[in-house]
Image: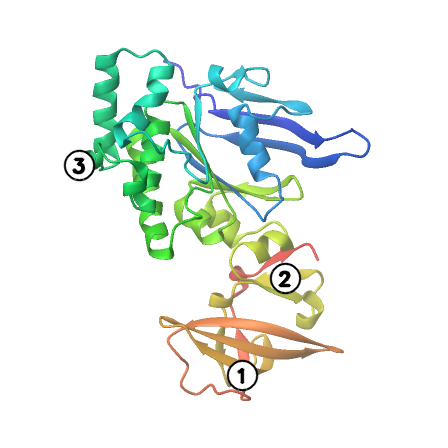
Amino acid sequence: MSDSKPSPCIEIHAVDKIFGSEASGYRALDNVSLTIKDKEFFTLLGPSGCGKTTLLRMLAGFETPTRGDIYLHGRNVVELPPRARRVNMVFQNYALFPHLTVAQNIAFGLEMLDWKKPQIGERVAKMLSLVRLEEFSARKPAQLSGGQQQRVALARALAPQPEVLLLDEPLSALDLKLRKEMQSELKRLQRETGITFILVTHDQEEALAMSDRLAVMSGGRVLQAGTPEEIYSRPASRFVADFIGEANIIPGEALGRSGTLAIRPEHITLGAGTPARLRGAVREITFLGADTLFEIAVPHGTEILKIRARLRGRAPDVEVDGHVWLHWPDEVEWGVDG
């Protein structure tokens, strides 16, 4: 019995993408390498212009690398057109056909692939059940809510049984409550279908909530890849620490050390008494419901450090302009590049 591990779903090797000339063009991707496991929910996360959508379009076959290779289950697909890849994409605007019903929209791709009518009918019924839209099959897109339209787009993309589903910020047009609901729906669909999902988003909370693993991108590069817990708890750089959640960046000399440290606000406790780390003046207290956010000014040489602490409930003895000691255990701090 072989104990060899299954091959990854996607392997991206040293991919560059330059729009324009090599010498003076825009470098959208810079030596990107990534491995995406089979059947995982993977997210490309970063600010606008970081290259995440360019990379997604390359996986779909809509863009070609300037150099580098992309493998899908061990097969180099760089030269393959989109139609020859078992990869489907859900666009930001859903791109539904307004003149077709829900069922016809889902069936369209299958017809283009020359599926037989009985197969199409059976598959459409299965997709309608999967996205819970059986009773809406005869409606046109204009008769659906934003969330329902998104489900139709997902069903249409999933119908041909792709190996990979690419999602280009599919939740950005939805309101907050519906966005949360659709996050759960996407996770359910990925789990039930067993298809590799690759999501592009600039929303850090969305990426942390939905992903098995994620890659943080900036300036066309992958800065760090790992599980949400790994990236949140141990960011590899100051950019990642600042971009994923909140982080207090503290010069090591403020604590009598070298380097630069980062501490998450929720890991800091406040109080009087014996100094543990730093002493500062409370400048702002913001009640956020389950949490309370404290902004604390800590003198450091000629500058003032602005430290944020996020506590469950509210410390009754802490007031604006009052002085507090800041405490945290050694294990919650980490070094980052300055």
Tell me if 220 is positioned left or right of 157 in this view: right
| Alpha carbon separation for disc pair 2 and 3 | 55 Å
Q: Residue 211's image quarter?
A: top left
Above or below for 47 versus 195: below
Q: Position of residue 319 (x, y in %)?
A: 48, 87
Tell me if 155 is positioned left or right of 327 in this view: left
Q: Amino acid at mark 3?
A: Glu
Q: Secondary structure at mark 3?
A: helix
Q: Secondary structure at mark 2?
A: strand
Q: Position of residue 182 (x, y in %)?
A: 33, 46
Residue under the image location 31 percent in, 38 percent down: 141
Above or below for 230 versus 320: above
Residue under the image location 45 percent in, 53 percent down: 205
- Answer few, some or many: residues within 10 Å of disc 1's Cα (few below 14, many 20 plus, some between 14 and 19): many
Q: Quadrant of the N terminus?
A: top left
Q: Amino acid at mark 1?
A: Val
| Alpha carbon separation for disc pair 3 and 1 | 59 Å
Q: Position of residue 30 (x, y in %)?
A: 69, 35
Q: Residue 110's image quarter?
A: top left
Along the viewing direction, whichever of 250 and 157 lies nearer the viewer: 157
Residue under the image location 41 percent in, 81 percent down: 315
Judged from this view, the residue extending furthest toward the right is 23
Q: Are marks 3 and 1 in contact (CB under 8 Å)?
A: no
Q: Which mark is residue 135?
A: 3
Q: Quadrant of the C terminus?
A: bottom right
- Give the residue number, with chain letter if any, for mark 2: 261
- Which colouring convention does the figure follow? rainbow
- Give the residue number, with chain letter if any, for mark 1: 324
Q: Which mark is residue 76?
A: none
